[in-house]
Every structure is written in C-alpha cells, then in structure tokens.
Image (tube, rainbow, N blue to C red):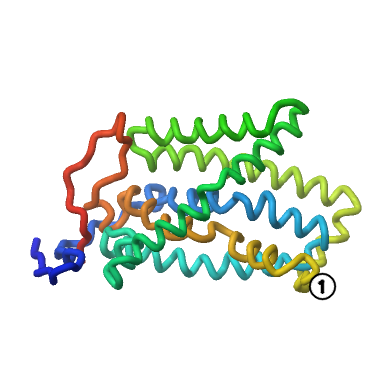
Amino acid sequence: MRTFPTARGKIPDVAVADLPDPRPLRRVIGPGVVAAAIGLASGEFVLWPYISANVGLVFLWGAFVGVVFQFFINMEIERYTLATGETALTGFSRLWRPWGLVFIAMAVLANMWPGWATSSATVLTYAIGAGDPVLFAIGELVLIGVILTLAPFIYRWVERIEFVKIGAVLVLLVGALAVALATESRGGLAQAVTAPAVPLELGAALILGALAFAGAGGAQNLVQSNWIRDKGLGMGARMPKLVSPVTGRPEAAPSTGYR
C-alpha cells in the first residue's frame, strides 16, 4: 500500500489499494432501503398530504422532480464512497477544510427540533384516542437514543428497523390505494398528469419545503455515504464501521480513504 505526502494544514492524502471484489446483489441491498425509509418522513407524512388535502394532486409532479434530482445526487455521493471509502463530508473537506463544520451545523439546525417526533406522536394519540403527544414524543426520542447507543453495530440495526418501516409503508400504500379507488377520491388521481400546476396560494415556503423534502433531503442525502461505507461496499470494506460507544468494539483502521 503506497501513501502520498500531505501539505501542511491539509487532510492526509489517500493511500493506494486494490478495489475489493464486488458482492452479489443480495448482499448489497440495504443502503437504498435505508435511504428510502429515511426519506419517508416529514415530507411524505406531513407536507405532501397537506398540499394534496388543499389543492389535490396538481403539484405531485413537484415530488417527482425532487426525487429524481436527489437520485442523481445520491448516486454521486455513493460513487465517491465506493471509490475511496471516505464519506462525502471528508470529500468536501478536501476541497475546503471548513466545509465539514458547515455541513454538520446545517444538519444539526435542521434536525435538532423535535417536530417530526411530535407530529408522529400526535398522529399516534389521535389513532388510539388517548395520550399526551408531548409525552409520546419524548418517549420516541428516548427510545431512538437508547437503540442507537446500545446497538453494537449501528448500521445493522438501522437497516433492520428501516426494512420493517418500508414493509409497513407498503401495506399502508396498498390499503390507501384500495380506499381511494373505491371512493370518489379516484376522480382526483388523474390530476397528477392532466392538470399540473404550482399552488402559489399555499406560499413559497411550503412549496420549496415540499420540493426539498421529497425524498431524503438535506443531510440525509450526505449520510448515504456512511451507509455505503458501513455496509462494507467498495472501498468501504477497508474502513472502520460506526459502532456503539457502550457495547461496540472499535476497529483499528485508517481514518482516510484509498484510491
């Protein structure tokens, strides 16, 4: 393995190593499912249902544009990690050292608010007809923290949980489609292609937010490189995995990537 000299103040250069052999298809399924499950969050459960309830499906084309745009972003993020084993944050930091801190700050500012947990808790208490949404939201956040802290290999647990979520969403989708086709709501399905429009009456903030959160959105796109690395795909097989600070066993491996 050959390394290269590093300029002062720069991230150490990557080493040279052979790309590991590709895995069979059944062994690479996972990061895409995690991305899809994480993408099914505030946009799909809050913003887009709100838009559809107010103006119908005339803006559904916006979701298609957002998802397609993010698909290509995700592919380039994954390609970088597959080729080097480094995360996207490390790659951006090679261009300009402070980029890592900038992206971390943006991720924290967008995700530190407990709005997603509170909204899901509100739906849950409405469905069961009892309970305090605030207490349910606190319980959800504590449960998530415990799982991510105690899981020895964090990615593996995230993957398992998100597989269950995707299965539940597919069941919900089939049920919702059956209800829509059996009622007068089926008449509005054609609006998605026959009457596309931009519902300006809903406000620019809501429209832009829906476009951004159609799919994963924001830092959730960048973290796709972490899932690729921790799955051990490409050069990620040579990199250390993210483990629990309590139950995990740290791996001795380089912090920079390869080429």
Is 3 on the left-hand or right-hand side of 176? left
- Measured from the top left, where is residue 159 in percent x and y? 45, 42
Q: Give the residue drawn at x 34%, y 37%.
A: 153
- For the N terminus, the quadrant is bottom left
In x, y percent, where is residue 86? 28, 59
Quadrant housing residue 204: bottom right
Find the residue positioned furthest to the right. 184
Q: Is residue 102 above or below residue 253?
A: below
Q: Is residue 96 above or below residue 78?
A: below
In the rendered picture of this protein, how many numbered marks are placed on residues?
Answer: 1
Percent x, y of residue 79: 36, 66
Tell me the residue at 81%/55% (across/down).
53
The answer to whether residue 184 is left or right of residue 246 is: right
Q: Is residue 114 above or below residue 181?
A: above
* Residue neighbourhood size for the residue with mark 1, other residues' Cα within 10 Å, grouped as few (<14), some (14–19), many (≥20): few
Q: Quadrant of the C terminus?
A: bottom left
In this rendering, position of residue 141 left or right of residue 136: left
- Vertical arrangement, residue 28 with respect to residue 143, above or below: below
Question: Which residue is the extreme one toward the top?
Answer: 130
Q: Residue at x 69, y 29 (%)?
A: 132
The type of residue carrying mark 1 is Ala
> Residue 100, how many percent across, how many down?
34, 62
Determine which quarter of the picture holds residue 69: bottom right
In this rendering, position of residue 125 left or right of residue 28: right
Which quadrant of the structure image shows residue 150?
Answer: top left
Q: Please, what secondary structure does the residue beneath circle 1 have?
A: loop
Q: Which residue is mark 1?
A: 195
Residue at (75% x, 43% y) in the render:
175
